[in-house]
Amino acid sequence: MSEPLLNKKIVLGVTGSIAAYKSADLVRRLQDAGAEVRVVMTQAACEFITPLTMQTLSGSPVAIDLLDTVQELTMGHITLARWADWVLIAPASANTIANLAYGQTDDLLSALCLATESPIAIAPAMNNKMWQNEATQNNLKQLSTRGMYIIGPDSGDQACGEQGEGRLLEPNDIVTELSHLVVPASLQGKHVVITAGPTFEPIDPVRFIGNRSSGKMGFAIAAAAAEAGAKVTLISGPVALMTPPSVERIDVETAEQMYDAAISHTSDSDIFIACAAVSDYRPESYQDSKLKKSQSSQLQLKLIINKDIVAAIASQENKPFVVGFAAETDNVEQYAMDKLIAKKLDMIAANKVGDGLGFGMDDNALALFWPAGSKVLAKAQKSHLARDLMTIIIEQYYAKNTTESS
C-alpha cells in the first residue's frame, strides 16, 4: 500500500506553458513511482519543449495531432482514453482549462479527456493575474464539480517577473499529490461484492414501493474497488447508470432478489459493501392485475419485513469484511454506531439524507466508524469520496486480517 502509483497507466498531458520544461522531470518522477507514462502534447506545448525529449524520456511515441492519419486509423485518442488509469495534465494552461470546462475538442488532449472514463487530475500553471481571473476560477469550479481533481498551483516567482499564485507545483509534489488521490492497488486477487441502488417491491404490475436512491455512490465504490485491482461483483437495483469498467454487474429488482444474489456471491468474497438502499418492507401479497381506484378515500396495504442482507452476511461463520451504510435524516452518528454494534459490522459509512442531501446528488459526505476508530470524509464528488472510502476500507481490511492472523 506504500506504492499507490505502481503499475498505474498514466497519460500525461502537456500544454502551452513555460512550465512545460518541468514535465520532462515529471515523467521521470512518475516512472520512479512505478507508473507507465504516455505523453500527449498540444501544439502550443511543442513550442516550449520538443516531442522528441518527451518520447525519449517516456519510451513511447508522443501523441500530438487529433487528425493524425496514422494514429487515428485505430482511433488513437479513444485507445489512449481507454488505456489510461489516470489522465494527468501538467502543466494545464488557462486555455486548456477553458477548453475542458466548455467541452471543446479542437485538439487531441481535450478530445481524449472528453472520451475517457478514467479520473482526470489538473495541475494549473499560468500568470497570477490569469489564475485569479474570475473566468479561470469559474472554469476550475465547473471541472471540480464534474469530478476532476485540481493539484496546486504553487505561489512564488513567475517567468513573467511577477510574484504570486499560479506556479506549477514541483514534479515531486505533483507525484505526491497524485499518489494521495489514487486508491492503493492492493486488492489483486481479492473479491469485492457491492450492492447499490434501490429495490422496487411490486404492488401490482404497475405500482411498486421504492426509494430515491440513484445508485451513484455504489457504482463509484465499484469503480474504486476495480481500480484497486479487485475482482468486483456489483449487485444493482433498478438504476440508469453505466457499468464501471472491469466490473461484473448483476441486475435485480426486489430485496429478495438482492438478498439471494448477495448470499450467493459472497461465499468466496473478501469484502462486502452494502451500499444499496434496500426496502425494509414489501407488500404481503402481489396483485396480478392493476388495482383499480375505488370510491373509498383510503387504500390499505399490509407490509411484511424483508430479510436483512448485511446482517445475514455479517453473521456468517466465514464472513467477509463487512461494510454497512446508514442513511439517516437525524441522529446520524448515534444510529450508525447502534447499527455497527447490533449487526456486528466491521465498518459503517453514515450520511445524512433529505433536504437536498444524499440520494440523487453528485456529491456527498460520510462519517465512518469501526470498532477502534472513526473518520469524517468531507463533502465531495461521489467519485472522490468513493476513492477515499475505498482506501480506508483497504487499510482496515488488512489491519483486521493482520490482527487475526497474529
Image (cartoon, rainbow, N blue to C red):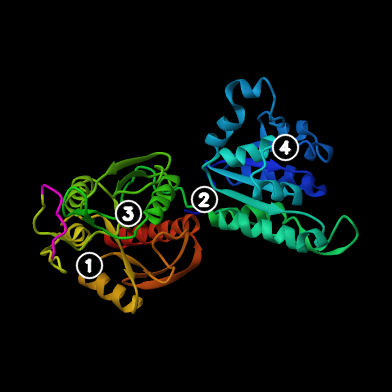
Up-down relation of residue 87 to residue 322 (above or below)? above
Residue denoted by label 1: 344
Closer-to-camera residue (111/248): 111
Determine which quarter of the picture holds residue 24: top right
The disc labelled 3 sits on which kind of residue? Gly
Region rendered in magenta = 288-295
What separation in Å lies between label 4 and label 2 (alpha carbons)? 25 Å
- 3 vs 1, front mark: 3
Query: Sequence order check: which comes first, mark 3 or mark 2?
Result: 2
State the residue lying farthest toward the front. Answer: 295
Q: Which mark is residue 4?
A: 2
What separation in Å lies between label 4 and label 1 (alpha carbons)? 52 Å
Residue denoted by label 3: 197
What separation in Å lies between label 4 and label 3 (alpha carbons)? 40 Å
State the residue lying farthest toward the left. Answer: 285
What separation in Å lies between label 1 and label 2 (alpha carbons)? 31 Å
Up-down relation of residue 235 to residue 36 (above or below)? below
What separation in Å lies between label 3 and label 1 (alpha carbons)? 23 Å
The disc labelled 2 sits on which kind of residue? Pro
